[in-house]
Image: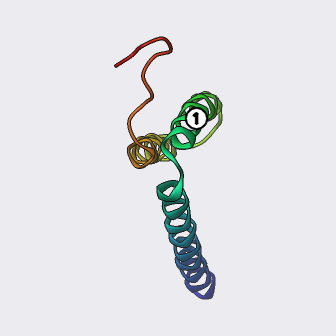
């Protein structure tokens, strides 16, 4: 029973740490100029695609991949809309 209690406490600690990092990241993104956010979005999209490919070939649960997809979509929504295609004046 002690191991279960310790595991539960550790999970709660990790959740708290994750929430702090999430809040910090959102604050940093919101403080970025639009052109920096657009560049960050492009890099994030490329890196997320690579990460998802790695996850698909790893021995992890579908729950982890599903959460990754949801959180990646949420991150993209926070960063903002994608930049217009190069050469587009609109």
Place residue 17 in its image quadrant: bottom right
Q: What element carries label 1?
A: helix
- Quarter of the picture containing the C terminus is top left
Nearest the viewer among 42 and 14 is 42
Q: Residue at 63%, 38% (x, y): give it.
A: 59
Q: Residue 45, percent across and down?
A: 54, 32
Q: Residue at 40%, 44% (x, y): give it.
A: 70
Q: Residue 15, percent across and down?
A: 52, 72
User: Dot 1: within a 10 Å radius of its alpha carbon, few (fewer than 14), some, or many (20 or more) residues?
Assistant: few
Residue, disc 1 = 39
Q: Is the residue 18 above or below the residue 71 in the image?
A: below
Q: Residue 71, percent across and down?
A: 45, 48
Nearest the viewer among 27 and 66 is 27
Which residue of the protein is positioned furthest toward the bottom in this rendering?
2
Place residue 3 in its image quadrant: bottom right
Nearest the viewer among 64 and 83 is 83
Which residue of the protein is positioned furthest toward the top in this rendering?
87
Which residue of the protein is positioned furthest toward the front in this rendering?
89
Q: Residue 61, percent across and down?
A: 53, 43
Q: Residue at 51%, 36% (x, y): give it.
A: 38
In the displayed structure, does residue 27 sit left or right of residue 50?
A: left
């Amino acid at each position: 029973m002690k191991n279960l209690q310790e595991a539960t406490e550790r999970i709660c600690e990790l959740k708290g740490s994750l929430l702090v990092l999430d809040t910090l990241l959102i604050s940093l993104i919101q403080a970025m100029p639009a052109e920096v956010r657009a560049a960050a979005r492009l890099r994030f999209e490329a890196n997320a695609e690579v990460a998802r490919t790695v996850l698909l070939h790893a021995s992890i649960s579908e729950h982890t991949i599903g959460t990754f997809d949801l959180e990646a979509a949420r991150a993209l929504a926070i960063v903002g809309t994608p930049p217009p295609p190069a050469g587009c004046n609109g």
